[in-house]
Amino acid sequence: MPADLRWTDLRLGTACNLACRFCDQAGLRGEADTAAALAALAALPHREGVVLAGGELTTRPDLLELVRGARALGFQRVALQTNGQVLAAAGGRVCLERLWA
Ligand code: SF4
């Protein structure tokens, strides 16, 4: 991630496709729906970098909408915190290229 940008982590839920023993989200519940997630993005105080975090966001059917929404709001960089399982199973690079197109 470019160090010359301000970055804000935005946690949008806790659902995950793994169950790591060390997970700090164990016992937490709750997901921001699409509208709430986009509203949270819009409320951030800058438009530099945002890290979308879960749970595991690649399990969300609205992930592409959230990324595009962040870009439409003017964020210079949109990063995704992921365990990579879905991306690896889908072919990794091909999936990412489609996601960020
Ligand atoms: S991948 Fe991350 S969010 Fe999912 S269970 Fe493991 S530590 Fe928790």
Image (cartoon, rainbow, N blue to C red):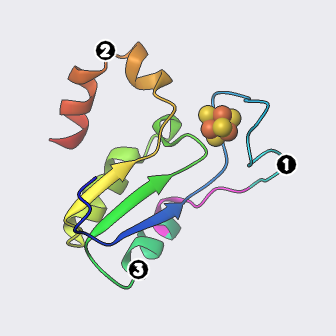
Under circle 1, the secondary element is loop
Q: Residue furthest left?
A: 101
Residue 19 placement (x, y as % from top left):
74, 29
Q: Residue at x 25, y 55 (%)?
A: 68
Viewport quadrant of the C terminus:
top left
> Where on the picture, by quarter, is residue 66?
bottom left
- Residue holding disc 1: 27
Q: Is residue 51 left or right of residue 83?
A: left
| Magenta-colored stretch includes residue 32 | yes
The amino acid type, in three-letter code, at marker 1 is Gly
Q: CA distance from mark 2 to mark 3?
A: 32 Å
Q: Is residue 58 left or right of residue 46?
A: right
Q: CA distance from mark 3 to mark 1?
A: 27 Å
Q: Which residues are magenta?
A: 30-35
- Which is more N-terminal, label 1 or label 2? 1
Task: Please tell me whether residue 14 is drawn above or below residue 12 in the rendered image.
Answer: above
- Which is more N-terminal, label 3 or label 2? 3
Q: From the image, give the main secondary structure of the stretch colored magenta.
A: loop
Q: Residue at x 41, y 57 (%)?
A: 51
Mark 3 packing: few (<14 Cα in 10 Å), some, or many (20+)? few
Proximity of marks 2 and 3: CB atoms separated by less than 8 Å: no
Mark 1 packing: few (<14 Cα in 10 Å), some, or many (20+)? few
Residue 29 placement (x, y as % from top left):
77, 53
| Towards the viewer: 22 or 46 | 22
- Residue holding disc 2: 91
* Tag of residue 44: 3
Under circle 3, the secondary element is loop
Proximity of marks 3 and 1: CB atoms separated by less than 8 Å: no
The amino acid type, in three-letter code, at marker 2 is Gly
| Magenta-colored stretch includes residue 41 | no
| Towards the viewer: 11 or 20 | 20
Residue 23 placement (x, y as % from top left):
73, 40
